[in-house]
Image (tube, rainbow, N blue to C red):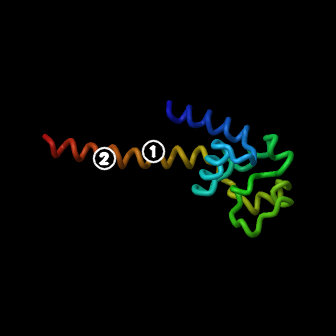
Amino acid sequence: QIKTNFENNLNLALKDYNMTADQHSEAVDTIQRTLHCCGLQNYSDRERTEYFSQRGIPQSCCKNQNDCSEEDLKDPNKAKLKVFVDGCFFLVTSTMESKMSVVAGISFGIACFQV
């Protein structure tokens, strides 16, 4: 359930992504920079957005901010070498799941001590 909600919300945020620095776009930028990912399933998801037709792939997908021009970001072949290619959905959900197992383990440990 959480995964489905997250996927839908991330998908909407990616589709509506723009440079007006609204909360959704900032959240997408933060996720992409922090987890080194781009798009939902992979970076090519970005090519199907309105933003891509105007500006290319977002700067927050770049591996190196100093070597990632707008010209590179508008060309899918060049962009592939300059941006994070992994999608964010799998990375976020696998991170959530690994953290959940830690939380579950700690909770179980605490429950055992209380017996």
Q: Amino acid at mark 1?
A: Glu
Name the mark on residue 44.
none
**Which of 20/39 is in front?**
20
Quadrant occupied by the C terminus: top left
Q: Name the residue that disc number 1 marks.
A: 97
Q: Amino acid at mark 2?
A: Gly
Name the image quarter holding residue 114: top left
Name the residue furthest bottom: 66
Name the image quarter holding residue 60: bottom right
The x and y percentages for residue 97 are 45, 44
Other-residue count near label 2 (Cα within 10 Å), few / some / many at <14 / 14–19 / ≥20 = few
Residue occupying the point 36% across, 49% down: 102
The x and y percentages for residue 3 are 53, 36
Residue occupying the point 29% across, 48% down: 106
Left/right of residue 83 with respect to residue 78 in the rendered view: left
Residue occupying the point 79% across, 41% down: 49
Pick whichever of labels 1 and 2 is earlier in the sequence: 1
The x and y percentages for residue 10 are 63, 39
Name the residue furthest left: 115
| Circle 1: element type | helix
Other-residue count near label 1 (Cα within 10 Å), few / some / many at <14 / 14–19 / ≥20 = few
Q: Name the residue that disc number 2 marks.
A: 105
Count every numbered label the image shows and give the total: 2
Left/right of residue 3 with respect to residue 8 in the rendered view: left
**Which of 22/55 is in front?**
22
| Circle 2: element type | helix
The x and y percentages for residue 98 are 43, 49
Q: Marks 1 and 2, how far apart in space?
A: 12 Å
Q: Are marks 1 and 2 in contact (CB under 8 Å)?
A: no
